[in-house]
Amino acid sequence: MASQKNPLDTDPISPKPSARKTNTACLQCRERKVRCSGSCPCNNCVRRSAECAFDQEDRKVLVSERLLNQLKRKAEFAERDSSPSSRKRQQKQSNDIRNSEQSNESNDERGEDVLPRMRNPLTTTAAKFVTDPQGRRRFLGPSSTWAYGRQVMSMIREYLNQDVSPLVPLNTDGQALPLDFPSEKQLGGTISMDNLPSLDYAIYLTNTVKFHISQTYHLFDEQSFLNGLFSLYNDGSRPLNGKTRLWYVQYFIIMAFGKALLVRGLSASNPPGGGYFMRAMEMFPDIDGLYQDIVLAIEICCGLALYLQSIDHRNSAYTYLGLGLRIALSQGLHRDPGGENRDHKEAVRERSAWWTLYILDRKFSSLMGAPNSLQDEDISVLFPQPNRSIQKSTTLEMHVKLSRLIAKVLNTVYAVDGRLDSSFLRNVQNMLRQLATLGEELNASVELDLNSLTPLSRVSATINLCYHQCIVLATRPLLMCLLRDKLETRSRGDKTHREIVGPVKALLKASCDSATKSLRILSALYSQDLLETFLPFDLDHAFSASFVLSLVSVIQPFPNSIGDSHLETTTTLLNALTASGNVSARFRQEELQRLHDMLLLVGQEYPDQANAPEAEDTSGFANVSLMPQGVSPNQMLSVASLLETYPGFDVSPDAADNRWLWEGDMPDFSYE
């Protein structure tokens, strides 16, 4: 065995001593003539439950670099001070260190730190709160200086006599210099009952919102909202205070949604439900007023944002949603409250409001092209567990998982460096594997069968559309890159037909299948009068799917593809949305028609490109029937595996071109 040098004997000036062979085997291993690990007890003796013993000179001790440095320093001190007392003290310290190392030797072999494991007491999974004299919970943020002071003093007080220890001052925000906010000056009055819907109609509008929205998003708590509704119509308008003002805002938002979801046809001026919505905006409080009821304020911000997004006010929608997110974060709703003794209904409502805020934030970030506002690693709150509707809880959990995947796509595929290289392939491969797992869960929980004569589930359709949007969203940069390459090649006069490599072609086929299935789902919803004519998501799915299919038809026409029929399907859907009063649908239809006209001009200018021969489908997707959620989990995994065997998977991140996308441009290209 190679010689082992003692670091304590190393002299950087003296020449290195000649190596000598040493034997560090224990007595048991030496007798059995087997290789010994040299540790005490050694691995062989541990497995045989035998007593492990070494010759004192041959024993090897494993120590960390930190302890070696300590021993070096102590050896230097020993050389300076050779008194008997110093030698005894040095020997005792060395023995202590050696004994400590022996007791932790098994941990060192696993690469663990010799120090005991410690946890940051400020970053527990469960959130920490303190209640102020007004009964309002204040979140103790992990890195907050104010919260740090409260936690340290509270910890000290726990170890002192409570009678003699001073109280911990709260000194909450706004206490130093109180302000008279406008919302506080307008309290005490009542709202006018003029132009309000009758009680029966208000209940009808509420139930409309419950059917169209509440199955997927939590915008209001049904029981508390109905209590306020009956109180308003039976007892009259209540005087405005912090909480009643917020309830009135929510009331007008729900009425606006109900009216918008029922109205058919275009309005001459205002959007459907716009009158009620403007009354909600007129009563919307300032920031201080929103903090009078945190959960209600978050529900209101979600409602405002969703309505504004539905009427194509994307920037305002994103801003109001961000306001709700900031309120939630400042109050610790993203953290699980731990062992707090809270009412079950209150906990379910709070968690439902948080996860709705989360889902909308992910979707709006995608629609805006903005980065995610919050990282998933910072969230520890649990899913709501209502006493009823297990299906609703399962649907929410699946919706959140898909929203997380959308966030990962935004953080990786749409990262700021903009690279479309091996990192892109790895990110897409990871996404496909996660989609395969989610696809199995979809089949087991919210399966969607378009070939059945049974009525279609609107909730299942929504979840499946989100599933396909993940694939479409991840492949859109690739489509644009391929189209640009083709256009640049033809603009240089190069008429050589270039074939896309098989793994990339398989990825395009997966995107094409998902876009096709999205249109099939939307068509089925339309046939059963379940198409959402006011909410923005069905419109976005139809536009995105048709746009992708139009590009694929030029970049890589697949055998047995639907050709231009997707334009007819999309036109039917957008016409239906436009006729129902959705002005944004008319804009999207105009944009799709403009794209179609441009692609026709490309075909006329470069006819050989438009009529390029359809190469044999080498992706393994030929003659594959679409599964309930579009592409089956096994097919997702096969595409992921195909990407991994492709040499472009290991292309240099510094590559400045897209040669890895095309056959013949990658040297030594082969894959199983």
Image (cartoon, rainbow, N blue to C red):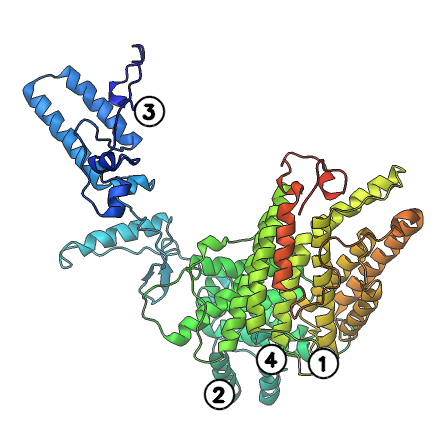
Comes first in the chain, label 3 or label 4: 3
What is the number of the mark on residue 235? 2
Tag 1: amino acid: Gln
Q: Secondary structure at mark 3?
A: loop
Mark 2 → mark 1, Cα distance in angstroms: 41 Å
**Residue 572 falls left or right of residue 116:** right
- Residue at image point 51% right, 67% down: 397
Tag 3: amino acid: Ala
Comes first in the chain, label 1 or label 4: 4
In this orientation, which residue lies closer to the viewer: 35 or 300? Answer: 35
**Residue 320 falls left or right of residue 34:** right
What is the number of the mark on residue 211? 4
Q: Secondary structure at mark 1?
A: loop
Comes first in the chain, label 2 or label 3: 3
Is residue 404 shown above or below 31?
Answer: below
Tag 4: amino acid: Phe
* Neighbour tally class for label 1: few under 14, some 14-19, many 20 plus, Cα within 10 Å: few
Tag 2: amino acid: Asp
In this orientation, which residue lies closer to the viewer: 497 or 543? Answer: 497
Q: Nearer the viewer, mark 3 or mark 4?
A: 3
Residue 447 visible in the snapshot: yes
In this orientation, which residue lies closer to the viewer: 130 or 17? Answer: 17
What is the number of the mark on residue 528? 1
Comes first in the chain, label 1 or label 3: 3
Q: Which residue is mark 3?
A: 2
**Residue 66 falls left or right of residue 234:** left
Q: Secondary structure at mark 4?
A: helix
